[in-house]
Image (cartoon, rainbow, N blue to C red):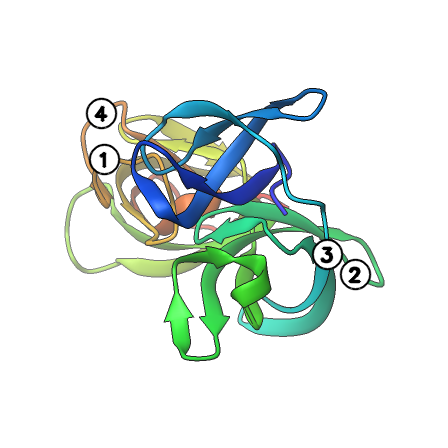
Amino acid sequence: MSETSRRVGLSCPACSADRPVGHEVLSEGSGQATVRCTACGHTHKRSLPDERTVSRRVVVSQEGESFTTTTEIPAEEALSVGEEFLIETEKAFVTARITSLELEGGRTESAPAEAVETVWSRAVGNVVVDVTAHPKSGAREGTRSLELRVPGDYEFVVGEADELGGESFTVEGIYVRDDATGYEFDKLGYDGDAALAKDVKRLYVRDESTTAWSAW
């Protein structure tokens, strides 16, 4: 399901000999493949299981609404919260990120595709970022809440001035979403700290103008 590499569920001789965990397929050879355990990083060779697919329900949320579709996934593939994938709709391909995996007994953050009943996700190709903008003077009066529509890969950097749609502002703080990966903290506030729009839960900025704005 990952758009960057194939992942399968296999036992790991280093950290999980008795149950399957996620493995990234690095290369496929004759008879055996080189795989890397996503839990501990151990690299080893294994025979891959025959690729059998399962049809799974996928719910994608976008701008406060959601739609449901189905997709075919290799049965042994290990799915995880934070993983991104492409899914085809009637109108276009949508890039989505897994936010939760629903199993028969409840929800979890990782599981083989075969055990999953529903993949919950949100669209991250184009996103809406909640923004709190306060006046340049620092006064509480005049603070306003905005919704910023931007491509998911648009980068915001703390301490840097930005201009979008004729509006000027300076980023002062970023709250990161729970499903984002690769960040040490969930709140970024030092100059140079950066986050992609698809990873931003809320953006705090110093308002340099007074007009409404949008990146689309």
Measured as percent of width and height from the top left, residue 104 is found at: 48, 79
Q: What element does badge 3 sit on?
A: strand
Q: Foreground: 34 or 46?
A: 46
Chain-order first, disc 1 or disc 2: 2
Q: From this view, report whether residue 162 is shown above or below residue 165.
A: above
Chain-order first, disc 2 or disc 3: 3
Measured as percent of width and height from the top left, residue 64 is found at: 53, 71
Numbered circle sitting on residue 184: 1
Q: Using the rendered view, name the quadrant where residue 65 is placed.
A: bottom right
Amino acid under label 4?
Asp
Q: Which residue is mark 2?
A: 89
Question: Can residue 1 be seen from the camera position used here?
Answer: yes
Q: What element does badge 4 sit on?
A: loop
Chain-order first, disc 1 or disc 3: 3
Left/right of residue 180 with respect to residue 84 in the rendered view: left
**Number of on-image labels:** 4
Category of crowding for the residue at label 2, using alpha-carbon neighbours closer than 10 angstroms: few (below 14), some (14–19), many (at least 20):
few
Q: Cα distance, mark 1 to mark 3?
A: 35 Å
Q: What element does badge 2 sit on?
A: loop
Q: Foreground: 205 or 197?
A: 197
Q: From this view, report whether residue 181 is shown above or below residue 53.
A: above
Q: What element does badge 1 sit on?
A: loop
Amino acid under label 3?
Thr
Category of crowding for the residue at label 4, using alpha-carbon neighbours closer than 10 angstroms: few (below 14), some (14–19), many (at least 20):
few
Question: Can residue 148 be seen from the camera position used here?
Answer: no
Amino acid under label 2?
Thr
Chain-order first, disc 4 or disc 3: 3
Left/right of residue 136 with respect to residue 123 in the rendered view: left
Numbered circle sitting on residue 53: 3
Q: Which residue is mark 4?
A: 191
Numbered circle sitting on residue 161: none
